[in-house]
């Protein structure tokens, strides 16, 4: 009897140990969308706003929240943010004055606010009216409501909380980019009514607009023409990779611009296009974690291109591979949808995810062959990959936020999202 009791005790103890071990070792690879494990490990920073009749997102804000959690969301102002995502910088004009606000992205607390004369804003077309250095210290703003004969640009020191420089340029200029140290402000000089422009450099320390313009090393006499659609930055903020589209000529290209170099040249790399210029707006960019490969993908055209950036990027860049695939039925009635962060790379850099007209494509980065196609009946304007590499978050202004498990392909709507019309996901941060 004692032996039997001892044997039963050992058996029960062993079973309990196995049960407890199994319960305590949930693998991220098997976590399903909507489970508490998947929804409480990270914070989503969602760009929330409505789309006006003029195809401009208005009333924008950034909402930080934990999917599936009852934690109160943090509402942040929409603006430019540093590459470390610690701060958001906002310029708001009113009555001839502009208020510059620095907001802590984690707490939502305003850490600095000050005013400068003039009308400047951080909202508007991509990069043309406001640009921020990678570390967030230097903010360049273009005066609103100017003329085509005079342009005013201000350089703001957000750390000191003051106006550092006012730049007056004869002619019609837009902003393009700024160097990490704030000493080089790159501008676009509009040269004709057709929309052609030159890339120019203003050196702050020398208080001068450098003679000549920054040209493509391969086609130095070709004028630029197109609108910026998406941008990736080198991790140190020294190189801007901007994707431009030109629907009038059915062209798309990546413009590689060194921001801290003393050699004033750039590089334009043409991208594949199809028969419909309207589908160029589905182009999106992703940069590898080590900064050596840039991916340009268009899920509506069914094309992915990988570009080598190894070595001296502006001199040695080249297209590694271009792959075409069948995008399916690309008919869409919604011609107003604009992508915001439409691509993401897996933590191991082996898979590129990007949105198309419908669904999310997954491509092997080594051969650019399609691996999966998720949520094929839904439209999305932006995606981001969770920190565990297993959950994709995809958004669309009228459909909200969807979670997709990359292993199983199962998708689930986030039903209690505080973002009412989510346009994109700015970034994801661990809790």
Image: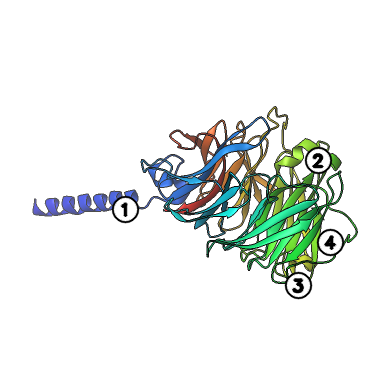
At x 76%, y 72%, the residue is: 262
Which SS class for mark 2?
helix
- Residue nearest the viewer, comparing 384 with 89: 89
Would you place residue 188 above or below residue 54 in this image? below
Residue position marked by numbered label 3 in the rendering: 262
Which SS class for mark 4?
strand
Q: Residues within 10 Å of mark 1 (few under 14, many from 20)?
A: few
CA gap, disc 2 and disc 3 = 33 Å
Tell me which numbered mark, 4 or 3, is placed earlier along the sequence: 4
Q: Nearer the viewer, mark 4 or mark 1?
A: 4
Tell me which numbered mark, 2 or 4, is placed earlier along the sequence: 4
Give coordinates of residue 367: x percent, y percent.
71, 54
Q: Residues within 10 Å of mark 4 (few under 14, many from 20)?
A: many
User: Do labels 1 and 2 touch, CB within 8 Å?
Assistant: no
Would you place residue 244 above or below residue 158 in this image? above
Q: Nearer the viewer, mark 2 or mark 4?
A: 4
User: Do labels 2 and 3 touch, CB within 8 Å?
Assistant: no
Tell me which numbered mark, 2 or 3, is placed earlier along the sequence: 2
Residue position marked by numbered label 1 in the rendering: 21
At x 60%, y 32%, the residue is: 378
Residue position marked by numbered label 4 in the rendering: 215
Give coordinates of residue 354: x percent, y percent.
64, 45
Tell me which numbered mark, 1 or 2, is placed earlier along the sequence: 1
At x 33%, y 48%, the residue is: 23
CA gap, disc 3 and disc 1 = 60 Å
Tell me which numbered mark, 4 or 1, is placed earlier along the sequence: 1
CA gap, disc 4 and disc 1 = 62 Å
Which SS class for mark 1?
helix
Q: Is residue 161 left or right of residue 292?
A: left
């Amino acid at each position: 009897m004692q032996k039997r009791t001892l044997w039963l005790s050992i058996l029960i103890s062993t079973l309990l140990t196995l049960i407890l071990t199994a319960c305590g070792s949930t693998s991220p690879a098997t976590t399903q969308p909507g489970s508490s494990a998947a929804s409480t490990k990270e914070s989503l920073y969602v760009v929330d706003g409505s789309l006006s009749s003029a195809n401009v997102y208005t009333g924008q804000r950034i909402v930080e929240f934990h999917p599936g959690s009852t934690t109160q969301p943090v509402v942040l102002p929409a603006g430019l943010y540093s590459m470390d995502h610690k701060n958001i910088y906002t310029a708001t004009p009113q009555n001839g004055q502009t208020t510059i606000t620095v907001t802590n992205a984690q707490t939502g607390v305003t850490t600095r606010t000050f005013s400068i004369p003039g009308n400047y804003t951080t909202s508007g077309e991509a990069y043309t009216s406001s640009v921020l250095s990678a570390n967030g210290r230097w903010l360049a703003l273009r005066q609103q409501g100017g003329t085509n004969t005079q342009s005013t640009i201000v350089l703001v020191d957000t750390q000191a909380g003051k106006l550092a420089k006012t730049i007056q340029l004869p002619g019609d200029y837009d902003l393009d980019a700024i160097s990490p140290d704030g000493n080089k402000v790159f501008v676009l000089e509009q040269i004709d009514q057709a929309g052609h422009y030159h890339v120019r450099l203003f050196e702050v320390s020398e208080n001068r607009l450098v003679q000549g313009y920054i040209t493509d090393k391969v086609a130095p006499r070709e004028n630029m023409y197109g609108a910026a659609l998406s941008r990736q930055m080198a991790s140190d903020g020294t190189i801007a990779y901007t994707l431009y589209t030109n629907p009038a000529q059915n062209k798309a290209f990546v413009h590689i611009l060194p921001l801290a170099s003393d050699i004033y040249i750039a590089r334009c790399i043409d991208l594949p296009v199809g028969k419909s210029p309207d589908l160029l707006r589905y182009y999106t960019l992703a940069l590898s974690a080590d900064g050596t490969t840039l991916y340009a993908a268009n899920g509506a055209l069914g094309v992915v291109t990988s570009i080598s950036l190894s070595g001296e990027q502006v001199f040695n860049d080249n297209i590694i591979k271009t792959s075409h695939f069948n995008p399916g039925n690309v008919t869409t009635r919604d011609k107003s949808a604009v992508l915001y962060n439409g691509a993401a790379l897996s933590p191991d850099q082996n898979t590129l995810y990007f949105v198309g007209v419908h669904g999310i494509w997954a491509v092997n980065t080594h051969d650019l062959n399609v691996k999966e196609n998720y949520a094929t009946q839904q439209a999305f304007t932006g995606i981001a990959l969770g920190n565990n590499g297993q959950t994709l978050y995809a958004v669309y202004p009228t459909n909200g936020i969807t979670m997709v498990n990359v292993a199983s392909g199962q998708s689930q709507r986030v039903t209690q999202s505080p973002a009412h019309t989510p346009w994109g996901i700015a970034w994801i941060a661990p809790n």
